């Protein structure tokens, strides 16, 4: 379709904020280009979701075996080196597979660093490429603490590619990455110490559940230092030193800096063409347009007021495809975006939170369950920690849910159709679940 320009749509970045929409757009006859300076696929396939779950799956089996130690005899041990090798085998083919998929649909994959020159032009090295519309999907990267010795620490990419798990590991932070990797390292046998920014972990989740999780992790041997106020990293002999608090020092073998992630907005020409951004990312409206009318942002780099998660990026990318193909002229209408911390036990949530419901008793009702005697959790998983909360509006429609258990991610997933399609009891009654299953149990407890 492109005539005046090289492309109808040119994407900067090749992650989920791009390829989920770019491929069907190309299938519809649009001329599409994708610029990528690193691995095709972006964070999720290469250094995020896929890699993390590959490493986490043996951890879940290990934890479940411990819960059933009175039935399953013997002691499992995680071979970390083999776990990492399996992760590599699992994900190493993904970039080429995604690239091949895009190319098979006629998309030009351009390797190099893309930088905006004007509203219709992007430079890649010495090459100038033009497009009617441009989508910035450059994602997030690990944040590094701005303290002395920060280069002595490591990030999440490096943790997931460790050939040997250190005997002692210090983790800076208390969000998703910190808690998930603390769970993994502890199960493998490392002595884990977590340096918290405040006195709470996983602040975006229901705090009574995070307190239960924190206590569970402490019982497994993980140490937490609250409001640590980390000041510097240094190296003394063969040890690394974390200085924190009131000039206190902690020796360790390895430091993971998990102090959040920040948007990739530098050196891509945003200032040169007038695209507004700040530390939260690129500002977008309800059509994912930036302050420049033909430049859009998608995925984690977009400051869209939504959780910066893979499902969000997929939804945004697909929405832009529909917008460019004139299949919609409406603003983006987000579904309920589920989220989960892949700790053991897990914490999952979707929709209206418990805190919001408690703050608005005129709008919402809450039903809380202890699940340890429930069929699935008692018989199938032997969970000792299993609780959830259902949030209803005054029409008794399910509008929110949160759970802590080994199966919280699957429980949340099972309820998404009820929440987003606003299914009533008669409609739910037309759906027969497998029994026993997490779905039959989760629906049955409503």
Image (cartoon, grey):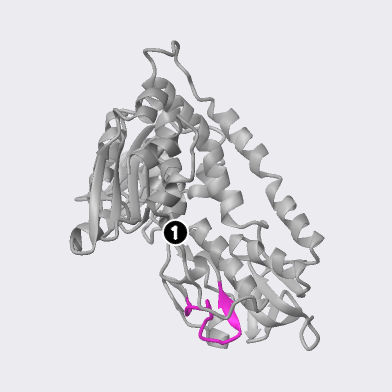
Q: Which residue sits furthest top?
A: 73
Apparent side of residue 162 relative to residue 24 in the rendered image (left or right): left
Picture coordinates of residue 372, whole percent (x, y):
29, 29
Compare residues 121 and 352 and report the one nearer the observer.
352
* Nearer the observer, 258 or 305: 305
Does the image show residue 346? Answer: no
Residue located 74% across and 52% down the image? 96
Residue that appears at 36% across and 48% down: 172
Picture residue at 29% right of the left edge, 27% below the top = 373
As drawn, is 388 to the left or to the right of 380?
left
Placement of 273 over or under 164, stated as above or below: below
**Residue 291, magenta (yes or no):** yes
Asked if residue 1 is positioned above or below residue 314 in the image, the reply reads: below
**Image location of residue 97, percent across then percent down:** 74, 51
Residue 365, image quadrant: bottom left
Magenta residues, as a range? 283-297
The quarter holding residue 125 reads: bottom right
The residue closer to the viewer here, 50 or 432, is 432
- Residue 49 belongs to magenta span: no
Q: Secondary structure at mark 1?
A: helix
- Residue found 53% across the figure and 48% down from its top: 49
Total residue callouts: 1
Is 229 rendered above or below residue 266?
above
Q: Is residue 393 visible?
A: yes
Q: Where is residue 86 shown, x and y percent of the image?
A: 62, 33
Q: Quadrant of the N terminus?
A: bottom right
Quadrant for the C terminus, please: top left
The secondary structure making up most of the magenta span is: loop
- Nearest the camera: 265 or 120? 120
Quick one: label 1, few (<14), some, or many (20+) residues within 10 Å?
some
- Residue 269: image quadrant is bottom right
Mark 1 — residue? Answer: 420
């Amino acid at each position: 379709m492109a005539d005046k320009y090289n492309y109808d749509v040119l994407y900067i970045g090749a992650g989920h904020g791009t390829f989920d929409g770019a491929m069907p757009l190309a299938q519809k006859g649009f001329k599409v280009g994708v610029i990528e300076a690193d691995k095709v696929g972006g964070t999720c396939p290469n250094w995020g979701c896929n890699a993390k779950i590959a490493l986490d799956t043996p951890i879940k089996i290990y934890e479940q075996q411990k819960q059933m130690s009175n039935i399953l005899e013997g002691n499992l041990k995680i071979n970390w080196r083999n776990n990492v090798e399996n992760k590599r085998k699992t994900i190493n083919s993904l970039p080429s597979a995604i690239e091949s998929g895009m190319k098979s649909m006629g998309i030009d994959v351009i390797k190099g660093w893309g930088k905006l020159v004007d509203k219709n032009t992007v430079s890649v090295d010495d090459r100038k490429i033009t497009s009617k519309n441009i989508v910035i999907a450059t994602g997030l990267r690990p944040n590094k603490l701005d303290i002395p010795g920060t280069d002595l620490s490591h990030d999440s990419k490096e943790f997931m590619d460790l050939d040997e798990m250190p005997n002692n590991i210090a983790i800076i932070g208390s969000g998703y990455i910190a808690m998930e990797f603390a769970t993994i390292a502890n199960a493998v046998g490392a002595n884990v110490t977590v340096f918290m920014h405040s006195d709470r972990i996983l602040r975006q989740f229901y705090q009574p559940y995070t307190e239960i999780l924190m206590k569970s992790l402490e019982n497994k041997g993980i140490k937490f230092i609250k409001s640590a106020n980390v000041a510097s990293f240094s190296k003394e002999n063969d040890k690394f030193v974390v200085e924190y608090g009131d000039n206190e020092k902690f020796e360790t073998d390895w430091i993971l800096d998990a102090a959040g992630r920040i948007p990739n907005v530098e050196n891509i020409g945003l200032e040169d063409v007038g695209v507004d951004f700040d530390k939260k990312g690129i500002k977008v409206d309800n059509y994912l347009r930036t302050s420049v009318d033909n430049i859009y942002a998608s995925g984690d780099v977009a400051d869209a007021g939504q959780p910066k998660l893979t499902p969000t990026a997929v939804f945004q990318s697909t929405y832009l495809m529909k917008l460019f193909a004139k299949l919609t002229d409406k603003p983006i209408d987000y579904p309920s975006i589920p989220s989960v911390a892949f700790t053991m036990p897990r914490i999952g949530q979707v929709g209206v939170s418990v805190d919001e419901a408690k703050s608005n008793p005129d709008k919402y009702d809450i039903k809380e369950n202890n699940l340890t005697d429930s069929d699935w959790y008692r018989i199938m998983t032997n969970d000792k920690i299993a609780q959830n909360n259902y949030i209803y509006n005054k029409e008794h429609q399910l509008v929110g849910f949160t759970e802590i258990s080994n199966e919280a991610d699957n429980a949340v997933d099972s309820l998404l159709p009820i929440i987003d399609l606003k299914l009533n009891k008669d409609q739910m009654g037309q759906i027969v679940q497998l029994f026993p299953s997490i779905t039959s149990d989760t629906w049955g407890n409503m």
